[in-house]
């Protein structure tokens, strides 16, 4: 059991003097972590080590970016290669061509690629591209989905009391932030996910005005909510029939479920897709990919997308190496993520059942989340807001910390398997979870 966190607590005091809430993104701070964040000293493989010398099996993995785990030797070598050649030129370089070629080979819908530096940059560019290409301004965004912190997306992302949600057909839109203008949200149309009839109605209601529907293929910012069978195909069909672009936000699912992301896994061809997180194996990266004629609208004088740091040598060396590691030996790396995740999910389900705890584990392959709920499944934002005991989940995650497992403390995120996780790590997580459940 971990009981020593004095150094983390001291650092937290020091951090709060110079950093807002002591951190650089609110989801890492004291609102979520009690009595404060654990300060990490280093990561190695599937584990992180804090400043007090405690080791944790890492299921959070840099908000899911570290698909290979920490300090992978080939990534370290790629970093060194980039360092020796100069990390960034902001000029054309062969490596960006090579990585784009590999992405076009791997990702079913990718005919052209544009690199960016984060998931937010990618999704923001994707919406502008869709608007520029179609000449229409509105887009459909689903309740509970998060596509980054661009103004037009910041509505109905955060869970809130069920009585504030409005009806399914007419969701009450509540911005997630101060500092937004009403104009920035005026063209964001809200709809509940996993309900094709309502998308159809919205398309009828806003006929001729909608540029795109943007969706995560698996809802991963309200835990883990899979698409209902056929839902993504229906979305594809209805958008095609109405000449609306389908943007698949694969920032979380890309380079994880399959080499070509969830679009390969579920066999759907979106018009535009966005990537980030696992693509960079721990360094900042983003990408927009899509059909050639649509992507051409990024040409000079059309849809503007700039970036001093787009496609740095550093990022390109790492993405190139990451693709090598994930796909060699018949995608053995990706298969390992699935095997580790599926074993964890089965083990956790068994523990819930054996202990008779009202709760479920949702997920398959590399990602999953637990919900303390009486329901048999959580299928959208509304289920999550009304049926899930998120406080209990947070207590459970804090109990896991004490037992050497670093998972997300927010029920709205998810646990992640990485290539460095071993059978021993799986056993460690399951033992800790069993004990943590008993202590609640
Ligand atoms: C689905 C999805 N899209 C986009 C983003 C934004 O990515 P970033 O945090 O790299 O800006 C996130 C971040 O969590 C995400 O979950």
Image (tube, rainbow, N blue to C red):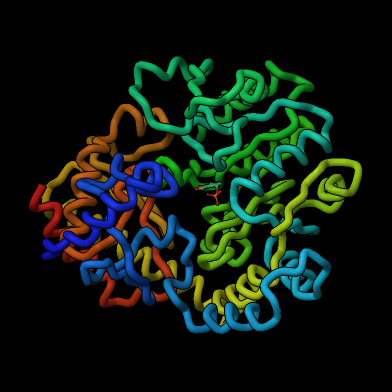
Please indicate whether residue 334 sits to the left or right of residue 305 in the image: left
What residue is rendered at 57% in x and 55% in y? Answer: 262
Measuring from the top left, give residue 300's x and y in whole percent: 90, 48
**Can I make out residue 240 in this image?**
no
Q: Of residues 383 and 178, which is closer to you in this image? A: 178
Please indicate whether residue 62 sits to the left or right of residue 83 in the image: left
Measuring from the top left, give residue 278's x and y in whole percent: 53, 62
Residue 61 versus residue 33 in the image, above or below: below
Q: Of residues 391 and 237, which is closer to you in this image? A: 391
Residue 425 versus residue 234 in the image, above or below: below
Q: Of residues 141 and 128, which is closer to you in this image? A: 128
What residue is rendered at 61% in x and 18% in y? Answer: 182
What residue is rendered at 33% in x and 23% in y? Answer: 161
Q: Quadrant of residue 137?
A: top right
Query: Quadrant location of the N terminus?
Result: bottom left
Measuring from the top left, give residue 204's x and y in whole percent: 70, 19
Measuring from the top left, give residue 42's x and y in whole percent: 35, 71
**Can I make out residue 49 in this image?**
yes
């Amino acid at each position: 059991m971990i009981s020593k966190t004095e150094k983390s607590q001291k650092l937290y005091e020091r951090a709060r003097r110079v950093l807002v809430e002591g951190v650089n993104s609110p989801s890492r701070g004291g609102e979520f972590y009690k009595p404060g964040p654990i300060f990490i000293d280093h990561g190695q493989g599937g584990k992180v080590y804090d400043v007090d010398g405690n080791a944790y099996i890492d299921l959070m993995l840099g908000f899911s970016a570290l698909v290979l785990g920490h300090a992978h030797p080939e990534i370290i070598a790629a970093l060194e290669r980039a360092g020796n050649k100069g990390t960034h030129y902001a000029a054309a370089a062969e490596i960006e061509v090579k990585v784009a070629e590999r992405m076009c080979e791997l990702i079913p819908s990718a005919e052209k690629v544009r690199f960016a530096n984060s998931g937010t940059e990618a999704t923001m560019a994707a919406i502008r591209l869709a608007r520029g290409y179609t000449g229409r301004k509105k887009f459909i965004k689903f309740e509970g989905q998060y596509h980054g912190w661009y103004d037009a997306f910041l509505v109905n992302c955060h869970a809130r009391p069920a009585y504030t949600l409005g009806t399914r057909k007419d969701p009450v839109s509540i911005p997630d932030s101060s500092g937004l203008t009403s104009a920035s949200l005026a063209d964001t149309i809200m709809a509940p996910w996993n309900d094709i009839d309502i998308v159809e109605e919205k398309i009828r209601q806003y006929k001729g005005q909608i540029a795109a529907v943007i969706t995560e293929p698996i809802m991963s910012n309200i835990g883990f909510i899979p698409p209902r069978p056929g839902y993504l195909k229906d979305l594809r069909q209805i958008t095609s029939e109405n000449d609306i672009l389908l943007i698949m936000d694969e920032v979380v699912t890309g380079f994880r479920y399959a080499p070509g992301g969830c679009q390969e896994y579920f066999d759907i061809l979106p018009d535009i897709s966005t990537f980030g997180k696992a693509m960079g194996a721990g360094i900042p990266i983003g990408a927009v990919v899509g059909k050639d004629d649509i992507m051409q609208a990024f040409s000079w004088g059309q849809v503007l997308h700039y970036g001093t740091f787009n496609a740095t040598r550093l990022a390109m060396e790492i993405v190139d190496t990451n693709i090598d590691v994930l796909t060699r030996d018949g995608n053995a790396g990706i298969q390992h993520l699935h095997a580790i995740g599926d074993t964890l999910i089965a083990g956790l389900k068994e523990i819930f059942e054996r202990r008779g705890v009202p709760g479920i584990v949702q997920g398959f392959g590399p990602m999953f989340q637990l919900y303390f709920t009486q329901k048999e499944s959580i299928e959208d934002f509304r289920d999550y807001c009304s049926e899930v005991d998120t406080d209990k989940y947070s207590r459970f995650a804090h109990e896991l910390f004490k037992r050497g497992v670093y998972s997300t403390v927010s029920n709205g995120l998810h646990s992640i398997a990485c290539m460095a996780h071993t059978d021993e790590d799986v056993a460690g997580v399951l033992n800790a979870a069993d004990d943590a459940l008993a202590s609640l």
